[in-house]
């Protein structure tokens, strides 16, 4: 377990044999969940730092029409909802569901405070993790704010493109990308086809070549 945890961003630069010593001074519990099991519900208080030991989970929520929108997938050994552990309204923003059999390490808030006070590396890692999560959620909300699929897709492509490169690699399958956008896979495939037909992009497997960057920029304005 500790070898897996040493790869977690929250334990960055902390040796595997140091982690049990670090945790020996605080309370923590290990829990297992089966595939499809709900781990936590939206608006529940977030009173523990949750770290995936193995497996993966998904964060999802219902929109106003009652449709389930997947916000993200989280795989071990990352943390879950770390940015919501503190604050005046520290409630979970999404439902957390196991995508496969998982094991989670739960560290109560009071124990997290102890670790933050006594271990500078853990403190730095925690601040980095919540900053990265806040940036991700901000970008996620920005994508969902686009009213058109073309706008969502154009922003996604442009945000992944490096300044001196025209090729973008999609880390997700079309199904995963469709869920990420909160749309159906056929709708995504149709829009991708339209962008290819308009000679704005070309696609080969999971690689997208940007032909008309100016046209992509127009789609997000």
Image (cartoon, rainbow, N blue to C red):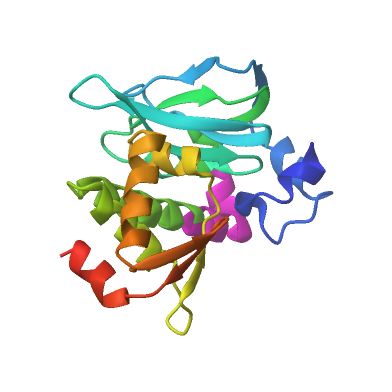
Residue found 79% across the figure and 41% down from its top: 2
Query: Predominant secondary structure in magenta?
Result: helix
Report if residue 115 lies within the magenta region.
yes
**In the displayed structure, does residue 65 sit left or right of residue 177?**
left
Q: Which range is magenta? A: 114-128
| Picture quadrant of residue 212 | bottom left
Q: Is residue 215 visible?
A: yes
Q: Residue furthest right?
A: 17
Exactly how many numbered labels are in the figure?
0
Classify the position of the N terminus by image quarter: top right
**Which is nearer the eye, 139 or 33?**
139
Q: Is residue 209 above or below residue 43?
A: below
Q: Is residue 85 visible?
A: no
Report if residue 132 lies within the magenta region.
no
Q: Residue furthest bottom?
A: 164
Residue 219: image location, x then y, percent = 21, 62
Residue 78: image location, x then y, percent = 60, 44
Q: Residue furthest front?
A: 197
Residue found 33% across the figure and 68% down from its top: 200
| Picture quadrant of residue 46 | top left
Residue 127: image location, x then y, percent = 47, 57
**In the displayed structure, does residue 221 sit left or right of residue 139?**
left
Classify the position of the C terminus by image quarter: bottom left
**In the displayed structure, does residue 170 sit left or right of residue 210?**
right
Q: Is residue 98 above or below residue 137?
A: above
Residue found 33% across the figure and 36% down from its top: 182
């Amino acid at each position: 377990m500790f070898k897996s945890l040493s790869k977690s961003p929250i334990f960055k630069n902390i040796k595997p044999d140091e982690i049990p010593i670090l945790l020996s001074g605080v309370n923590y519990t290990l829990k297992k969940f089966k595939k499809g099991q709900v781990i936590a519900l939206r608006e529940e208080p977030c009173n523990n730092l949750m770290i995936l030991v193995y497996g993966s989970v998904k964060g999802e929520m219902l929109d106003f029409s009652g449709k389930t929108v997947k916000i993200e997938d989280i795989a071990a050994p990352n943390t879950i909802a770390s940015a919501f552990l503190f604050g005046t309204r520290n409630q979970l923003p999404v439902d957390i569901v196991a995508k496969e059999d998982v094991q989670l390490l739960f560290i109560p808030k009071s124990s997290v405070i102890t670790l933050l006070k006594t271990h500078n590396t853990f403190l730095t890692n925690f601040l980095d993790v919540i900053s990265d999560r806040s940036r991700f959620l901000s970008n996620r909300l920005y994508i969902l704010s686009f009213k058109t699929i073309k706008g969502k897709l154009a922003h996604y492509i442009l945000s992944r493109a490096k300044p001196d490169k025209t090729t973008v690699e999609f880390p997700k399958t079309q199904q995963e990308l469709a869920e990420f956008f909160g749309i159906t896979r056929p709708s995504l495939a149709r829009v991708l086809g339209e962008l290819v037909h308009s000679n704005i992009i070309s696609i080969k497997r999971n690689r997208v070549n940007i032909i008309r960057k100016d046209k992509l920029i127009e789609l997000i304005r």
